[in-house]
Amino acid sequence: MSLFKPEVNFNGKNQKRKLFDSKTRRKKRNSADAGQEKRDLEKEKRLFQNRVVICIGICMIMIAILFSNLYYLQVLSYRDYQTRSNENRLKIVPVVPPRGIIYDRNHVVLADNRPVYHLVLYPSRDINTRQEIISLNKLLSLDLSERELDALERESRTRKKFSGIEIADMLTEKQIATFSVSSYKFPNVQVEASLKRYYPFAEIATHAVGYVSRINQKDIEQLTEQGIIDNYAGSSEIGKLGIEKYYEKELHGKTGSREVEVNSHGQVIRTLKDNPPKPGNDITISLDIRLQYYLQEIMGSTRGAIVAIEPQSGEILAMYSNPSYDPNLFVRGIRSRDYQKLLNNPGKPLINRVTQGGYAPASTAKPLMCVMGLNEGLITPTGSFFGAPYFKLPGSAHQFRDWRPWGHGWLDLYRALEISADTYFYDLAYRAGINRIHNYLDMFGFGKRTGIDLNEESTGVNPSREWKRSRFRQNWQLGDTVPIGIGQGYWTTTLMQLAKAHTTLANRGNVKTPHLMKEISDPSSKEAKPQYFTDPADPAYLELHDKKSWDVCRTGMYLVVNGPEGTGRRAFEGAKYKAAGKSGTAQVVAIKQGEKYDASRLKAEHRDNALFVAYAPFLKPRILVAIILENAGGGSRMAAPLARQVIDQYLLELYPGGYMGEKEPQYIKFGIAGTVGVQ
């Protein structure tokens, strides 16, 4: 037993030591764990505090950024964003000014503005534009083609914000009523009113008054170059022809504006501010619409033109080109098929035959050649000349025939004009030469614009050596000069050029520019004084070496109407005034040597043109008339009676009581022409 006891005691101590050590270590471990836990809590606390500080810092920075941005938006960028906001709500609508009214000389309205109603669509993303237009087309019977539908759809995609597209204009009362009943189906469509140009006399004065039509890309480019495109904001029309185009600046006025509030569809809710436009100026032109009517009546279906001028002032009393057309077709946007009808019309109604038609002046040029011959000393009033049946150049077999196959016998200048002897003026042209003739024709205004206040004017041809070389690459020949003496050959003129030249002759060399404008007045100011036309050529005067040339040539024209052999005596027989004039018959196609002119064997378009120029009363002219009748035949037979009717209408019917000539005639002997009573 004793052998094992020490061992037991030893193990017990060891066990106790182990237990002690275990407790000690446990205490130390617990103590360390407690310390570690304490340290972890402090670390977590510090970490949490740091995170809170960081979060607070981030929040402060975010708040600072937020307030900085708010300051930038609300203070620094206030005006910019206010403007953007207003752009979504407010709209500046241009207000088109009323176009100036055009009156005739007696204050009869020739071009007016009348209210019309348009169907305007404001495209929306929520609505199918094409389908909506198709529905409106069917509902209102607008007769829109597929091409027009495509154009409207394309316009809806390229339009400016809040601007509508016009689907139809000039709606009828029935169409307006039909739309009103169904308007709830089309929330972005509305009927708008505006003023539209209207020409009450239709085709009577088209070529003088002209017309307005829709602004196209070419117009926009021109307005931009001129720097006035802003004045056409909202405008859809611009002058395209005649007075409407020439005086566009005066007639258009100044565009105004209106600030309105709109909804999301662009429809106006209310008006906030109004800046009224300035109406265009009114224009009074020199035409007498009564005389215009008369010109149309006497011309009937004959192609041609008539112009009547007051010689002392240059005012155009009437000008009519036949056939004409209705300008109202262009105002509302002419359909392609209607335009093709005008283009394909054999009468060419779109051409103004007064200022654009090119014609040989024929024998109406002989009084002007007379002025040249006298002033250059090539002829004298009573110098003798034998009028043979034809004229031949030295060394040439070609015959320049006279209109009278057997000739006229002995002539002086007076008789040569009275009976319109061709050979007399063939010889004069040959001796004068083309250079001298060209210079005198230039002096009378041929080959250049007359200065009339219309853009639609041709210059004609004043032939010369240089012109032929440039045009045909050929040299001028003597045979080219001879027919110029009777207004044939290469010489072409407009009726307005011919009228201006004879006005100068009637005025004894005093040049007057033909014009339509009589006065311009401001309708918005009763105190404003009207502006009157100022002749740019006044006081131009054609100075001649021999000033008696004017009276000699005027007397020759007097004999044409009043002389015993005058080519116009039958047309003016029994007139209550004394007139002067000159007939002309212009060949359209050449007649071969040895052949005679036979109108029945020629096509209608190849027959002679008839011309006549006349003025009255003789001593102090109040009216000058120039006429061209295409393919009508002889001037003295066809055109002279019309000239008589126009002068009668003006002097006896429209403006009676004015100067009609001297009461007692003065009888004077004019060489071979005999004795004539001049009044």
Image (spheres, rainbow, N blue to C red):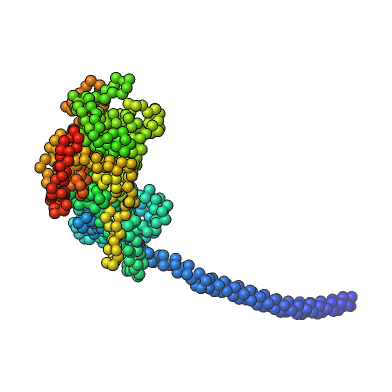
Taking the image as drawn, is residue 97 in sight?
A: yes
Report the quarter where the N terminus lies: bottom right
Q: Quadrant of residue 336?
A: top left
| Of the pair 472 and 120, the residue shown nearer to us | 472
Residue 672, how many percent across, how many down? 18, 33
Q: Nearer the viewer, residue 73 or 108?
A: 108
State whether residue 355 appears in this view: no
- Residue 211 x %, y %: 27, 50
**Snapshot quadrant of residue 395:** top left
Q: Is residue 325 above or below residue 359?
A: below
Q: Against 424, is 62 above or below?
A: below
Residue 466, image x and y in percent? 40, 33
> Which residue appears at 27% of the width and 67% of the height?
526
The spot of residue 78 in percent (x, y) is 48, 71
Task: Count up the numbered dots.
Answer: 0
Q: Judge by depth and name the residue closer to the eye, 255 or 20.
A: 255
Taking depth in this image into account, of 595 and 464 the one nearest to the observer is 464
Vertical placement of 64 versus 333: above or below? below
User: In the drawing, does residue 6 fall left or right of residue 233?
Assistant: right
Q: Which residue is at 35% across, 61% downward?
A: 255
